[in-house]
Amino acid sequence: MIDALFFGVGLFAVAIGIWRAVRARRTGAGGGLAISLIALGIAFCLLANSAQAVESRIYPSLGRLLSNLATMVAAYGVSVTVAEIGGVRHRRKRIRPAVLLVALVVLAVSFFATRGLPTGVGLFSELYRSNPTLIAYIVVYTSYLGYAVAEIAVVSAGAVRAGTGAFRAGLGVVFVACLVAFAYLVGKIVDLIRDVGAEHPVAEVCEGAFSTPHCALAVGFPAVSVLLLVVGLTVPAFPAAGRALRDARARAELRPLRTHLVERYPDVVRLDHEDGTGRERLLTMMSEISDGLLLAGVDPRLSPPAAVRALRTGEGPASGDAVESAAGTAFEADVTRLRAIAREFRAEPTAGAASPAR
């Protein structure tokens, strides 16, 4: 059951991250959030007990290394996101990836230079005193992650006070995730100091992420923190995803009507029709259709059936053909009107269409 939760949440985060990455290519923003979600999703999958068992059969404690590397990549993505939110993305643009690369290399080298690593979900407690490489591993990992967590905690706390709706709720969850992450990082440093000073450190292997209080702090807390981060980062995406879905459905409904009008009036076409976000493409399509309807002599006040009759036959409106504007914002009213006309257009026979004006 726990593994199903880990894999389910992890794969969901990866899917949302990929969607955000595609969106970021069009908008030029949100790349850091996409990196964070994909890396956090991978880290969450790697933290599952069954995944760590398989990874340890390949190399002892490999699951710990891979999940830590993925978490650091996620921290880099969070750092980029913070810079985007703060409007300082251009600062340290080259330093950030360079620092991440150095930290990842140090972690990998120090990990594989350590002998006697435990299999399964093992802790490194008894190895710190005899393996300085693991001390370097923990210091670099906690320093890099701690700085990123501090950055996002400050930004999320400020956004909770100033934000609204899903954005505020999501960053509130992110702030709680930062508190859990701080507890985990402090615990790592305390354990390191204690185990290095102990004369006879005892090896400890966890049966699960929450099998003992020590395992919960060392393995369970990062899993909880990652889960909260995934939830917090995806909550603000829900309204945008719903809006994108509605816009895509609207474009699909309007496309036949646009195609007909473009064939009759090619000059209404915008050259950048396929550029921009989904909302921008919808606005472009609506503008083209509105221009085409005006050129066809369709009065904006006509009801959808009357508008389609005028479009097909070129006849003027009859009495009672006018209709009141739909309620809502101007954009919502325009979308509702044009979608209604598009539905009527698809339902009407194509014979007898008016010839293009010359």
Image (cartoon, rainbow, N blue to C red):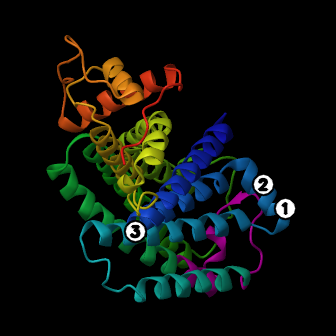
In this rendering, position of residue 117 left or right of residue 138? right
Say which quadrant the N terminus sits in: top right
Q: Position of residue 218 (x, y in %)?
A: 54, 58
Tell me which label, 2 or 3, sits earlier in the chain.
3
Q: Amino acid at mark 1?
A: Arg
Q: Which residue is mark 3?
A: 28
Element at label 3: loop
Q: Dots 2 and 1: beta carbons under 8 Å?
A: yes
Residue ID at (56%, 56%): 18
Element at label 1: helix
In this rendering, position of residue 222 left or right of residue 270? right
Q: Quarter-wise, where is residue 5 in the image?
A: top right
Q: Which range is magenta?
A: 113-138
| Near-viewer residue (164 or 19) | 19
Q: Nearer the viewer, mark 2 or mark 3?
A: 3
In this rendering, position of residue 44 left or right of residue 277? right
Instruction: Looking at this view, name the residue that lies furthest to the top.
Output: 320
Q: Is residue 125 magenta?
A: yes
The number of callouts visible is 3
Density class for disc 2 (Cα within 10 Å; few <14, some 14-19, many ≥20) is: many
| Near-viewer residue (71 or 245) | 245
Q: Which residue is mark 1?
A: 57
Q: Position of residue 54 (x, y in %)?
A: 81, 56
Tell me which label, 3 or 1, sits earlier in the chain.
3
Q: Dots 2 and 3: beta carbons under 8 Å?
A: no
Residue ID at (44%, 63%): 26
Residue ID at (20%, 44%): 164
User: Does residue 165 show up?
Assistant: yes
Q: Position of residue 2 (x, y in %)?
A: 64, 38
